[in-house]
Amino acid sequence: MVGTQVAIIGAGPAGLMLSHLLQRAGIDSVVLENRSREYVERRIRAGVLEHGAAQLLRDNGVGDRMDREALLHRGIYVQFEGERHHIDFVELTGRGISVYGQQEIVKDLIQARLAAGGKLLFEAEATHIGDFGQDDRPWVAYRHNGQEQRVECEFVAACDGSHGIGRAALIAVGARAYEREYPHAWLGILARIPPASDELIYAYHERGFALHSMRSPEVSRLYLQVPPDEQLAAWPEERIWSELRLRLGESSLQAGEIMEIGITPLRSYVLEPMQSGRLFLAGDAAHIVPPTGAKGMNLALADVASLAAGLRDRLLSGSPERLAAYSGACSRRVWRAEYFSNFMTQLLHRDAEEDPFAHQLRLAQLRQLTTSRAAATALAENYTAAATEMLGQGVVPTPGA
C-alpha cells in the first residue's frame, strides 16, 4: 500500500502537469499510468498551444525546450474557392500560437518530474476508485508488475481520458453527459516531409475539408475529411497524396514517408459536474472537442492549473472554496471551447447529402470571415484564448508562481 496526498490517474499532459504544479507547491502526489513510458512519450496527439497554455509551461519551469523548438505562428490560412486568405492573430489580438507536439510536452514533464523525485508508475493500470465521498479517505486500486496494489490519498484526480475509470465513477454517482456525434471523420497522417506552408491551412473544398499542419521543420501533420465509417483500406498512399494536393491547392506537395496513419471520428462531449466529493476529472476524462478548433490539450492544461490552485488552498491553508468551485470555474471556458470547435467544424466540412443552398451559405460565411475585421477578430480571439482565457486574465494563479 502506498500513501500520498493526491493520487493522479493518467500520465498525459494533464496528469503530469498537475503532479508538477503540486510538487512546486509542496504537495505530494503519485501518478499511475496504464501504458509504458516509451508509449506515452511517442503517442502523437495535439500540437497547437494557445498563448496562455504556453505561458503556463514557461511560468512553471518546463518551457525552455518549447521556447527553443516550437514553431511560432502569427495566424492561420483559410482557403476556399481556390483562394487562400491569411488571418493574422497577432495583428488582431496581440497573441499568436505555438506549434509544439503533445508528446514533446509529455517528455519535458516526465523529465521534470523524475528530476524532482516524482513518483511515476508506468504500466500501472488503475482498476477502481474507492471511498471518494466528501468525508471519506479515498483510495485507488491498481495492477502493477502482476500484483494488485492500492494507493491511499486525500484526493483523486482522474486525468485518464475518455475511456478511463474516472469518468465511469462520476457517471455512476449521477454526473450528466452532453454529447454530439458529427457526420464526419478525419483521415490523419504524420509524414516525414517539410511543411508546404509556414502556417496551418484550413481548406474548405467541394470534396471535403483538408488541414495542413506540422510538428517540426521536417515533419508534417495532414488531414482529410472522410465519412465516419470509412476504412483505411480505401486510402492507398497514392490516393492520399493526390487528394491532399487537390483539396489544399498544393500541386507541388511531395509524397513522403508516412510515419503514422489513422481515422478519427469527430465528436463533442462534456460531463458535468467534473467533481464529486474528493474525486476530480480533468482533460479528456471530462470533455472532448473535435480537433478543428485546436482546443483539447489547451483545455486539459487549463483544467489542471485550476485544480492545482484549489488543491493547494485546501491542503496548505485549509481553504475549501476554490476546490469546491472547480467544476463551475471550468464550465465557462469548456463550453466556449466546445462552441468554437463546433463552429469551426460546421463551417469547414461538407455534408454528404447537403443541398446547394447550405453550400452557398457556408461560402458567404467564409467570405465574411476573410473580409470583415470584426469577424476575423472573433475567430482570432477564440483560436488563441478560448481554452485558457482565465489563465491569461490571472484568474487562475499557477501554484508554482
Image: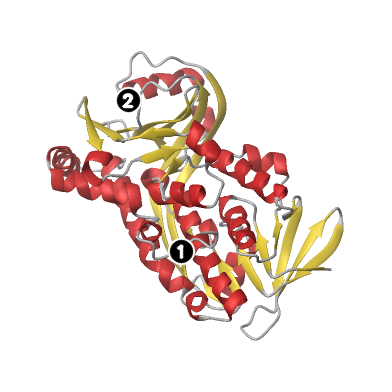
**Amino acid type, residue under disc 2 in the picture:** Leu
For mark 2, what is the residue?
248
Q: Nearer the viewer, residue 265 or 68?
A: 68
For mark 1, what is the residue?
397
**Residue at far bottom of view:** 135
Q: Position of residue 157 (x, y in %)?
A: 61, 66
Q: How many badges with numbers are in the image?
A: 2
Q: Is residue 274 above or below residue 191?
A: below
Q: Work out whether mark 1 precedes mark 2 in sequence or the reverse, and give the earlier one.
A: 2
- Report crowding for label 1: few under 14, some 14 to 19, many 20 or more residues within 10 A (C-alpha): some
**Amino acid type, residue under disc 1 in the picture:** Pro
Q: Position of residue 91 (x, y in %)?
A: 22, 39
Q: Nearer the viewer, residue 294 or 5?
A: 5
The CA distance from mark 1 to mark 2 is 41 Å
Q: Secondary structure at mark 2?
A: helix
Q: Secondary structure at mark 1?
A: loop
Tell me the colour scheme of the image: secondary structure
**Residue 142 placement, left or right of 290:** right
Q: Is residue 237 above or below residue 263?
A: above
Q: Is residue 360 above or below residue 318?
A: above
Q: Is residue 89 above or below residue 158?
A: above
Q: Nearer the viewer, residue 169 or 206?
A: 169
Q: Position of residue 218 (x, y in %)?
A: 50, 21
